[in-house]
Image: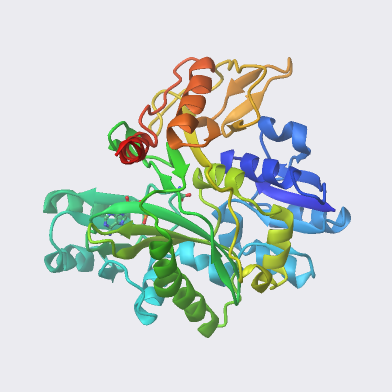
Amino acid sequence: MKILLIGNGGREHALAWSLSQSRHQPQLYFAQGNPGMQALGQRLDIEMSDLNGLLLFAEREQIDLTIVGPELPLSLGIVDRFREKGLKIFGPDQAGAQMESSKVFAKDLMAEANIPTAGYRFCTTQAMALQSLDEFQAPYVIKEDGLAAGKGVTIAQNRHGAELAIQAAFQKEMPVVIEEFMQGQELSILAFCDGKTVLPCIAAQDYKKAGEGNTGPNTGGMGAYAPVPLASQALIDRVQQDVLKPTLQALQAKGINYRGILYAGLMISPAGEPKVVEFNARFGDPETQVVLPLLNEDLVDLILATVEGKLDQYAATGLQFKPNQCAITVVLTAAGYPGPYESGKPISIPAHVSNDVHIFHAGTRVLPDQSQVTAGGRVLNITALGQTLEEARAKAYEIADQIHFEGKYYRRDIAAEPAKALMAEEAV
Ligand code: AMP
Ligand code: GLY
């Protein structure tokens, strides 16, 4: 079986690793992949936005299955193009990808389907946006309506900050969504969805802020862990009934056959009520780096079932995850990220790590002399598994400490609080 995987980050390295474990022993091709994925398959020099190039390659090489990692090709309509040619591809079509690419599409769908989410106002002019602030209270949530890699949201503590964010958005000619502020704890649920059946993975939590104690600017993600103690089976069931199933029905009602990952970013209120912060149309990064190593299913089978509309095979039992195992990912970044940072710093990585540790590459590059250097803001993701979160944390941080490159930065507090809370529970 030949599989083409599109994307080049830590998420794709984790996907590639998981695919390589499949009983199908697929031959893997990466567009473009990263140096960490080199050992798992063949890297291609085709950009993820080059839909013609990707399609040509898939036809010529008779690729059996294409898997789309990032949102950009989905929002460009890669799935429509592949489906037209009868090629199997994992991900929603362009209409479905609007769940992520258009905040207002997602908010309107949630309103129509009565899915719990923050109240909002979609504003197409600056004057309208400034006036609409009257309907909200501080803190103000201002979202640019387009793909923004998690960086298009401003939470302003006062009206002046909100006005600045609105002006900045309209300078870029981006309409905005103004939202009610929601309090609580965030949770990410990635769900496999075949257009008829939707099945959630275990919940993960990602750390979006650059600084320890959730301070500083928003990033693409500084770390993650799973499972999340807050996400009881009762809560997951509720998300399934109140969010995932009605969302799928609302998509169906619009004639959208959504096949891929539906990623629900949730806010769990202090009273335990889930509300949707956002939807994404793809695997989360870095959530995937903790969810896939815990998955107790053959990923190729699961993805094929999704693409072929046969997920109901898994419905009776639900998706299976390794019992009594926890995973954490620590993201190592270049100094300065998410602001300006330098690249090209030589990286040294320990030659051997144990089986339950993965060093997933994100922003690295190989020089002609085969040495590896930094080539992005998020450089490496260290994933470790353990029987407890504390054990997984210890393993991940041990390796994080042994990796060296100039300006290496990471948060020391990934999963620290839930690990402490669990240990306190056990001591009782
Ligand atoms: P988004 O791009 O919609 O995921 O927003 C990025 C981050 O901003 C979220 O992960 C939340 O931490 C925060 N955020 C977004 N919308 C809200 C909201 N309505 N209330 C509180 N926090 C929010
Ligand atoms: N972890 C957030 C995202 O993938 O958008």
The mark total stands at 0
Whole-percent x and y of residue 11? Answer: 58, 43
Taking the view exactly as shown, the residue that stands out farthest to the bottom is 253
Q: Nearer the viewer, residue 233 or 19?
A: 233
Q: Nearer the viewer, residue 115 or 75?
A: 115
Query: Taking the image as drawn, is residue 171 in sight?
Result: no
| Residue 179 sits in quarter | bottom left
Q: Quadrant of ligand 1?
A: bottom left
Whole-percent x and y of residue 35? Answer: 68, 30
Q: Residue at x 73, y 18 (%)?
A: 370
Please tell me whether residue 134 is drawn above or below residue 389 in the rendered image.
below
Whole-percent x and y of residue 302? Answer: 69, 60
Please tell me whether residue 134 is drawn above or below residue 285 in the rendered image.
below
Q: Nearer the viewer, residue 224 or 126?
A: 224
Left or right of 110 on screen, residue 384: right
Name the colour scheme: rainbow
Q: Residue at x 43, y 41 (%)?
A: 221
Whole-percent x and y of residue 255? Answer: 57, 82
Question: Quadrant where the C terminus lies?
Answer: top left
Taking the view exactly as shown, the residue that stands out farthest to the front is 428
Left or right of 53 on screen, residue 341: left
Please tell me whether residue 196 is drawn above or below residue 292 in the rendered image.
below
Q: Nearer the viewer, residue 257 or 352?
A: 352
Q: Residue at x 74, y 32 (%)?
A: 38
Left or right of 18 on screen, residue 153: left
Query: Taking the image as drawn, is residue 33 in sight?
Result: yes
| Residue 269 sits in quarter | bottom left
